[in-house]
């Protein structure tokens, strides 16, 4: 990491990507959409290490918690339509959890979106990633009857349980899976034809392989929610930040509840989506190697910063 930090800055993004592969990443995809320039793609390493297939910028990638941006936009649109209320609570929307989730009568939809609920995080359960839960009920069972980590609204703690509940609430209000709503209201208007809700919707050969240090096998076939190409994520992020994604009145709601950039992590897959206002550039980075101590996460953040420095220099 020290080496990655202190080495002289490369002249080009491609050279920076090539250098990063030398630090142990199996594959990298970088997408840059800078104003007044055509979108640019950079790749290094492998799409599939075993079969020696080079990294492909059009590969599908598991975007993990970047999906929370799409969820927050969907909530915004449902609030704008009057179908959800940011001030209603878990007790209002999921009454079966009263007495099982502490403070369920005080935790509002707004607090869940903002990670200020105090609910324990189900993915923090011991050895969670060795055998992840597959259903809402299995995930819920990991945190039922546990004490709150703090009083609602009193602190901030990033928590996947918040979005487990938000997705359940959206499903219940809509009467169908909320990804269909996301597809109709977000993906189709932006022509995002390479964004999907799960592995079941895609050809597995289109998915970039993922690797976790110490685990011998490709993690490509593990189900972890949304997948997308770097270009699709970049197009979405541009529309999120410039407001073109929203109908009148929606942007004000969104700005009051959530952020405009995100990162994601599941075993084998690290993803970063950020808009840099000073250079009017959307930058998406996908890395297909993770490790138990998050060494690669910290290393990728150094690389991300160097990529932006190169962009600013040019």
Image (cartoon, grey):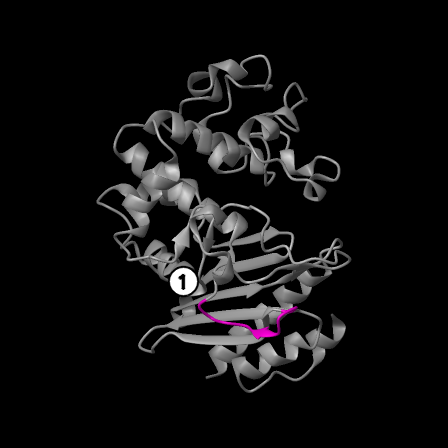
Residue 108 in picture, x, y percent from top left = 46, 26
Q: Visible in this render: residue 281? A: yes
Which residue is at 52% across, 33% downward?
164
Residue 160 in picture, x, y percent from top left = 57, 38
Position of residue 99 in the picture relative to residue 38 (left or right): right
Q: Which residues are magenta?
A: 49-58
In this picture, is 141 found above or below 222? Answer: above
Q: Residues within 10 Å of mark 1 (few under 14, many from 20)?
A: many
In this picture, is 218 found above or below 307? Answer: above
Position of residue 266 in the picture relative to residue 238 (left or right): right
Q: Visible in this render: residue 119? A: no
Residue on which the image places disc 1: 234
Residue 252 in picture, x, y percent from top left = 31, 43
Q: Using the image as rendered, state which of residue 213 and residue 81 is in the foreground.
A: 213
Which residue is at 27% across, 35% downward?
80
Picture quadrant where residue 239 is located: bottom left
Which residue is at 74% across, 70% downward?
1
Q: Using the image as rendered, state which of residue 254 and residue 186 is in the foreground.
A: 186
């Amino acid at each position: 990491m020290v080496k990655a930090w202190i080495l002289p800055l490369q002249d080009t993004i491609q050279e920076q990507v090539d250098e990063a592969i030398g630090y142990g990443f199996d594959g990298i995809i970088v997408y840059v959409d800078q104003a007044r320039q055509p979108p640019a793609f950079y790749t290094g390493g492998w799409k599939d290490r075993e079969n020696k297939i080079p990294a492909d910028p059009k590969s599908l990638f598991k975007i993990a918690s970047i999906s929370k941006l799409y969820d927050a936009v969907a909530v915004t649109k449902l609030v704008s339509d009057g179908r959800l209320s940011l001030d209603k609570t878990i007790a209002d929307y999921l009454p079966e959890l009263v007495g099982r989730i502490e403070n369920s009568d005080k935790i509002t939809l707004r607090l869940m979106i903002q990670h200020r609920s105090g609910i324990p995080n189900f993915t923090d359960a011991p050895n969670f990633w060795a055998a992840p839960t597959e259903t809402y009920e299995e995930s819920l069972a990991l945190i039922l009857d546990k004490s709150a980590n703090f009083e609602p609204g009193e602190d901030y703690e990033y928590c996947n349980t918040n979005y487990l509940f938000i997705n359940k609430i959206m499903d219940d209000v809509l009467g169908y899976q909320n990804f269909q709503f996301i597809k109709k209201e977000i993906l189709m208007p932006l022509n995002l034809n390479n964004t999907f809700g799960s592995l079941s919707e895609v050809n597995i050969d289109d998915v970039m392989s993922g690797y976790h240090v110490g685990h011998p096998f490709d993690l490509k076939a593990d189900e972890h929610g949304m997948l997308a190409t770097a270009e699709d994520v970049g197009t979405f992020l541009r529309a999120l930040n410039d407001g073109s994604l929203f109908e009148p009145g929606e942007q004000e709601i969104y700005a009051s509840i959530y952020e405009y950039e995100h990162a994601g992590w599941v075993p084998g897959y690290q993803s970063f989506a950020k808009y840099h206002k000073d250079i009017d550039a959307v930058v998406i980075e996908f890395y297909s190697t993770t490790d138990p101590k998050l060494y690669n996460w910290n290393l990728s953040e150094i690389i991300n910063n160097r990529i932006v420095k190169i962009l600013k220099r040019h």
